[in-house]
Image (cartoon, coloured by chain):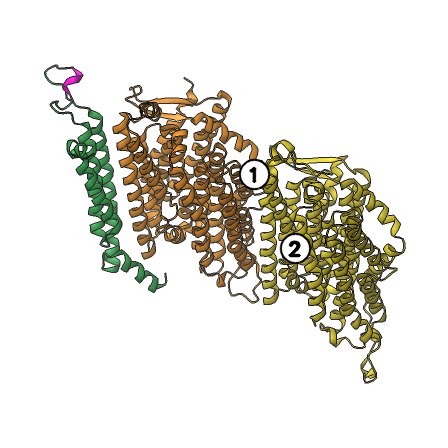
Chain colours: A orange, B green, C yellow
Amino acid sequence: MDFIQNFPFFSIMLSMFSGTVCSVLPRRAARWVNTLMISLIGVLSFVLLSYLVVRGESYVYMMGHFPAPWGNEIRAGILEAGTALFFCVIMLLSMLGGRKKLQEEVVESKHNMYYILVNLLLSSLLALVYTNDLFTAYVFVEINTIAACGLIMIRQNGRTIEAAVRYMIMSLLGSGLLLLGICMLYDLTGHLLMSNIQAAVQGILEDGTYEVPLLVTITLMSVGLAIKSALFPFHAWLPDAYGYSTVSSAAILSSLVSKGYIFLLIKIIYRVIGYNVFGNSHIIDVLFVFGLMGMIFGSLNAIQENDIRRMIAFSSVAQIGYIYMGIGMGTGVGMTASVFHILSHAATKSLLFIAAIGLTDVSGGSRHFIDLTGAAYRNKWAGVAFTVGSLSMVGVPMFSGFISKLLFAQAAVQNHVKMLPALIVLAISTILNAIYFMKTVIRIYTPEEGSEYESVTFKNMKTYAVTLVCFILLNVLLGVSSQPIVDLIEQGLSMFA
Amino acid sequence: MGSNLLINYGEAVAMLLFVIGFTNLLLQKNLIKKIIGLNIMDSAVYLFLAEKGYIEGRTVPIVVNGVQDVEAYINPIPSGLVLTGIVVSVSVTALMLSLTIRLYRRYNTLDLDEISTRLKKEGL
Amino acid sequence: MSYFVLLPILFPILSGIFLLVRKEMKNRQSLLITVGAALVITTVLAITAMLTVRDEIFLVFNLTRTLPVLFKIDGVGVIFGIVGIIVFVCAGSFGFEYMKHEEHEKRYYGFYLIVFGILMALCFAGNLVTFYLFFELLTLSSMPLVLHTGSKEAVMAGLKYLFYSLCGAYMVLFGFYFINRYANTLSFSEGSVLNPELAAGHASLLLGAAFVMIMGFSVKAGMFPMHAWLTAAHPAAPAPASAVLSAVIVKAGVLGIIRVVYYLFGASFLQGTWVQSVWMTLALITVFMGSLLAYREPVLKKRLAYSTVSQISYILFGLAVMDPDALTGGMLHVICHSLVKAVLFLCAGAIIYKTGKTRADELRGIGKEMPVLLWCYTVASLGLVGIPPTGGFVSKWYLAAGALSSGIPGFFWIGPAVLLISALLTAGYLLPITISGFFPGEDFDYGGLKKREPGVLMTLPIALLTALSVLAGLFPNVLTDFIARLAADIL
């Protein structure tokens, strides 16, 4: 066994331990430990990714001394390593971009707490990505929920606590369903490891004995994860949670937490149930329809919103709709498109949140559209970044959003039944996106004479500006050289199957 | 169908409890009742697991008296899962309760909808 | 060598960005010199590229495996490119004087140069992906020109412009998804790129896709029923920008339609189908309706915008007939209309600059105040009406002849008839200004007149464009030979 194969385990554990260490360190040191650890895990994931690309196949890593089917396992393929790397990058950038805001918004004694939560969140995300065991996945889903809840309410006011409670309730409903689904699946197959379950599921289908319970199980798990990832109409908690928490939290929640659950769902589809079984059940059509509805209603809600943060949050609902639409398409191309959109949306949405905070800061802290008039002149970097994010969301070529849309459309034209609804909704939703994002862009670039707010310069926000530039580059990178990434995703998905 | 339900009465009760807990968590306005619903829901799942793991006429999987025969013991994994699950649900419940206390101190009510309307009035 | 094609695209875009990001210049002079130099250098680069790397494919990079971004200069690209250069340089130098009374000149010229570069890219785009990319960018980068004054009216017009254009772009994208599936390649090539095996049995779907794409591009070209943005957005911009928008930017839609119809689907695929009939009907409705609305519009710049709506649909009608003569007429009208409409908008701008008058009925006696300007206006108007010896006459002649000889039932006589009626209306809305300008009538107070001829920086570009439009009519063979050969190739 190569030493590199230990890396997934190292990443999860490093993240957890650094969380523990952060609790006793002074505030500044904790911040550095946090930043360094995320970068280190990113590097580890990158090395692992290149190792796997060279190796060309995934591997299973035994945790402890018990072999399958009893022990616990980690599994690493290209998709897992790539997602881990991407999550680290986004998390690092989100933390850097919101650092200053964190110091202003959160009481000083809670800062260490914040770093602990972030590390915990990262480790649970990594575990969700890497694990090969369903019950472990459940446990880390809950840890993820708790950490996310902490991230929401770390900035304390009535809104965030209420949002956290709503988030918890929805999440608990989702994880209850997921848990029940896992238990029933265990009951049906007698296994908890993904590969063993899949073999047993095949056996069940061949015998034709437990088809209805299997269907119920699939439904429970899909619906549970859909609720947790805020698929329309389970999104009621989302705008408050993203809209009022501190900006790093909002960026991390929208781009990573919900994506972690979707990644788990994809993993369950491929590795547990089996792609064909899932495709033949009607769950996939249900996901498709709800995805389409999310795309429309999310955007409609966003249009009505007068608060820039909540508007971006509602746009997340629409984007998650896109991802579920791709999953619901029932083709490999659709799945590739969804995975790409997970990356693309993560890069764009965190950029938008971070840029929006720069704009609201130079408008007296108000998030109302009227007050944002001319904000882009007062904070030029945030203005440009917000524009780039908006263009990407609208789907202008050269940015990542365009490639996602292209992939979705390519997937749609291959499926004759779902082609027309998918394409029409894609077009409508894109135009709706354009309406609210371009409206905002024009608003922030409308010059306002004699504004009472001061403008900021590069000197006052070095970290912030550099973060924005990194985000923009990431977006353009995804938009311009998407082919290698799409190839990697395809390879990763084929390793899944 | 009906006869199956009678034979697997434990599972049937577990499902019933799950639905009761789920609807409580979803529909109750009072936060404490919601949390109780959450606990019912989780317990229902543990009951289901325990019921599944138990085999009539066998004993706890602790080796005493040197009996190593597999046939003598029940399946230990579901029990292990229940233990893990209880830990998770305890921590989640604790978190929910602490959040509820926070809200109650601020708004003197346990009704989530009322808190929402009040927040809107505050214009926060 | 083939990378030469990138120079006229990148140079103006980069110099525009440079202008936008650098600090406010100390004096106006240095800004104007920079802009002037950028315009001249771009012209030189573009012409060099057209002469040296015609028909060479230059691959920039692959967006995805099957979708390369590539450039290729072909005949149609050269025509649109040259028209664009002439109008941009003339309107640019006109602006040197005109923009004095507007604020934020640096921003204006920054975006002006970027639009110029993107327009060049659009002309030289070698496949649909590249075209679509720059089509979107064109909309976005020309937005600030519409928004320039920052008034409420301008912002509303800008939003209207943006949403109509984005809707159009997404209609194009919608069709793009389908053609991407059924075509061998998306590179523009004479005739059809459809893969006969894949496309077999999907003809009606592909016709629908073609229709959606044509409608999508026609939004930019201001065809009924998607024309409302044009008459709001064009007059809202400063006059030189209006000239550019009305003369060149709308032609991007025309170019798009030419590319889709003649270079992707192939004319033979669409001939005689419902797509062609609907398209011709809409174009004729637009021709008539545009002229009628222009006739009733009192504000000069708005009247010119309505006139653009009508005149662009002349071109679209010529394209829709799919006959070599009509196609030649359409392309010729692209050139003539660009030159003439630029002159008209610049004249309107010069009048606003000097007198502040915007309504047509306020312009009595204007010919006594600025005779050179009004002469140019008159000659250009005659060109738009289609009176020999101007270029407009030649292009309309070809359009009518093509329609008559095409033998499409109904349209072969309705078309020329509508064009004729619309030409009369055109005369009706343009020439009264000349008449009352030169002959204000008995009761006019001549005492209040003073010489207000605009400076040479404004007059010269207008005179130059007017002269070109007349030359196009005096020596049409140079153009018609070139275009007729092109038309024969792609039909």
Same chain shared by disc 2 and disc 1: no
Residue visible at 58% across and 42% down in the picture? C205
Q: What element does badge 2 sit on?
A: helix
Residue visible at 35% across and 30% down in the picture? A13
Report the side of A263 relative to C116 (left or right): left
Q: Position of residue C305 (x, y in %)?
A: 70, 63
Magenta residues, start to end: B67-73
Identify whether C261 is placed above or below B75. Answer: below
Residue visible at 45% across and 48% down in the picture? A295
Q: Chain of mark 2?
A: C
Q: Nearer the viewer, residue C158 or C225?
A: C225
Report the side of B7 relative to A65 (left or right): left
Task: Give the quadrant of the N terminus of chain C.
Answer: top right
Residue A91 location, quadrant: top left
Q: Does the segment drawn in magenta span residue B70?
A: yes
Q: What element does badge 1 sit on?
A: helix
Q: Nearer the viewer, residue A40 or C5?
A: C5
Say what amino acid the circle numbered 2 marks: Ser
Q: Residue furthest left?
A: B65
Task: Give the quadrant of the C terminus of chain C.
Answer: top right
Report the side of C442 relative to A384 (left or right): right
Residue at which label 2 appears: C142
Q: Position of residue B24 (x, y in %)?
A: 22, 48
Query: Distance of mark 2 from mark 1, alpha carbons?
Result: 25 Å
Residue B84 can be seen in this image: yes
Residues at circles 2 and 1 in contact by the CB criterion of under 8 Å: no
Residue at which label 1 appears: A477
